[in-house]
Image (tube, coloured by chain):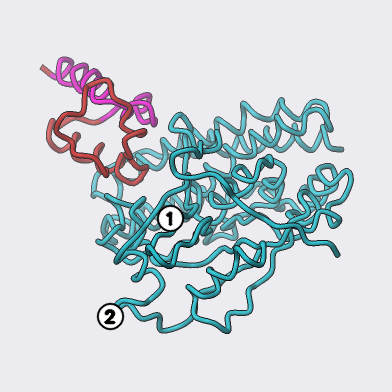
């Protein structure tokens, strides 16, 4: 993205801030590697990556269910 | 034939992108040419949706999805805009500069390296061919305002000189492809929307092009893991994004033509399903390209079904 990631609030619209389709794919892969999870089919949509809050919610569900 | 001056008065601070480029869309960016013309028409106060009728003829040939472009004959009949290749006998910056006095606009191929609106993707980091339309050209202050992708932006200084090949090392080996746009309102045709919709629909793909796309996606599952992520992104742009964006824009068209062709809007939900499923398929294929397993079949199946249903509704409405 074209903005400094430091200071982005958790509910900011990442697409409004310049998150591209290309970048959202890389975000998904990086998150799956980092947390050793796999986004379920219903989460493989644009809105999942629209904010830090949305991403946190999905990751929290996935990591909770794996412990 | 009377030619009226063609001027875009919007500036980066006043221009508001067309709704097809808003962040809530599945595919806010489609391809550079399609996006550019949406914003040109929007900035001129014209409705860009009718010119999307060309998408009704989109196809997949077993290798590539159609790289859709608004058709010159549609732009002429719908809006009285005459689009031709510019006779590029002068350096690019001099041609662009000539536009204001002549009352014409240009589209010009440039290198995204010099476009500040691509910060984070190509700006000063990658050489990517794209197309812009300059809206103001200030030779004295070395400033250019331009439409690109989903918006209207400004560049200046070294970016101004670089984009026109005026910096040492930035010289243009070949002249870029340049189009000149003239406003000749008498060339617009009454009832053009119905005409272009019928024409493009009559040229629609045989069978279901999404079935051919789906077969190529399944095939890609075999070679993408060895191709690297940079190739994946190029492939995804050419395949799933073009199909998904086509479907999402066709949903808008279907709703737009519902007055002329009652019942057409019923195609929109199925076409939006194609769009959303293409997004899901793109995520899954990224996994595959990254060396992991991914079952893309359900998403592709939803795309095939949605396209079938969407086109059946449009064909029934248009007759």
Residue A5 is situated, as x and y percent measured from the top left of the image, at: 18, 36
The quarter of the picture where the N terminus of chain B appears is bottom right
Q: Which residue is mark 2?
A: B169
Q: What residue do we see at 47% from left, 50% from top?
A: B149
Q: Is residue B231 left or right of residue B73?
A: left
User: For chain B, what colour was chosen?
Assistant: cyan
Q: Chain of mark 2?
A: B
Q: Secondary structure at mark 1?
A: helix
Residue A22 is situated, as x and y percent measured from the top left of the image, at: 34, 46
Q: Chain of mark 1?
A: B
Q: Main secondary structure of the magenta part?
A: helix
For the residue pair B122 and A44, the one nearer the viewer reads as B122
Whether residue B158 is situated above or below residue A14 in the rendered picture: below
Mark in the foreground, 1 or 2: 2
Work out how far the residue at label 1 is from the one at label 2, CA to CA, in angstroms. Answer: 41 Å
Residue B297 is situated, as x and y percent measured from the top left of the image, at: 45, 39
Q: Is residue A59 magenta?
A: yes
1 or 2: tag closer to the N-terminus? 2
Whether residue B225 is situated above or below residue B174 in the rendered picture: above
Q: What residue do we see at 36% from left, 28% from top?
A: A41
Residue B220 in which image quadrant: bottom left
For the residue pair B133 and B242, the one nearer the viewer reads as B133
User: For chain A, what colour was chosen?
Assistant: red
Q: Is residue B137 magenta?
A: no
Magenta highlight range: A39-66
Q: What residue do we see at 29% from left, 44% from top?
A: A23
Q: Which residue is mark 1?
A: B219
Q: Secondary structure at mark 2?
A: loop
Are marks 1 and 2 in one subunit? Answer: yes
């Amino acid at each position: 993205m074209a903005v400094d990631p430091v200071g982005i609030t958790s509910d900011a619209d990442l697409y409004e801030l310049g998150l591209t389709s290309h970048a959202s794919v890389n975000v998904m892969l990086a998150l799956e590697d980092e947390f050793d999870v796999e986004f379920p089919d219903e989460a493989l949509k644009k809105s999942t990556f629209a904010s830090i809050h949305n991403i946190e919610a999905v990751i929290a569900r996935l990591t909770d269910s794996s412990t | 034939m009377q030619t009226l001056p063609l001027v875009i008065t919007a500036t980066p601070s006043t221009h508001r992108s067309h709704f097809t480029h808003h962040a809530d869309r599945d595919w806010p960016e489609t391809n550079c040419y399609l996006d550019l013309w949406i914003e040109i028409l929007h900035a001129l106060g014209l409705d860009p949706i009718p010119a999307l009728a060309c998408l009704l003829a989109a196809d997949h040939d077993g290798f590539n999805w159609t790289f859709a472009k608004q058709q010159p004959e549609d732009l002429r009949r719908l809006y009285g805009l005459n689009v031709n290749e510019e006779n590029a006998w002068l350096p690019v910056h001099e041609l662009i500069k000539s536009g204001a006095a002549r009352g014409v606009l240009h589209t010009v191929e440039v290198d995204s390296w010099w476009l500040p609106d691509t910060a984070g993707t190509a700006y000063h980091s990658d050489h990517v061919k794209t197309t812009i339309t300059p809206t103001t050209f200030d030779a004295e202050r070395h400033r250019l305002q331009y439409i690109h992708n989903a918006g209207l932006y400004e560049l200046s200084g070294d970016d101004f000189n670089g984009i026109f090949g005026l910096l040492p090392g930035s010289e243009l080996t070949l002249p870029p492809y340049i189009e000149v746009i003239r406003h000749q309102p008498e060339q617009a045709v009454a009832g053009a929307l119905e005409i272009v919709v019928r024409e493009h629909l009559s040229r629609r793909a045989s069978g279901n092009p999404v079935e051919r796309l789906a077969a190529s996606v399944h095939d890609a599952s075999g070679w993408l893991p060895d191709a690297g992520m940079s190739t994946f992104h190029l492939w995804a742009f050419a395949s799933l994004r073009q199909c998904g964006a086509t479907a999402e824009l066709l949903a808008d068209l279907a709703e737009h033509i519902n007055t002329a062709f009652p019942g057409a809007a019923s195609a929109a939900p199925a076409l939006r399903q194609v769009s959303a499923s293409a997004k899901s398929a793109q995520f899954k294929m990224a996994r595959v390209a990254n060396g992991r397993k991914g079952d893309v079949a359900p998403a592709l199946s939803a795309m095939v079904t949605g396209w079938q249903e969407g086109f059946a509704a449009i064909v029934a409405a248009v007759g």
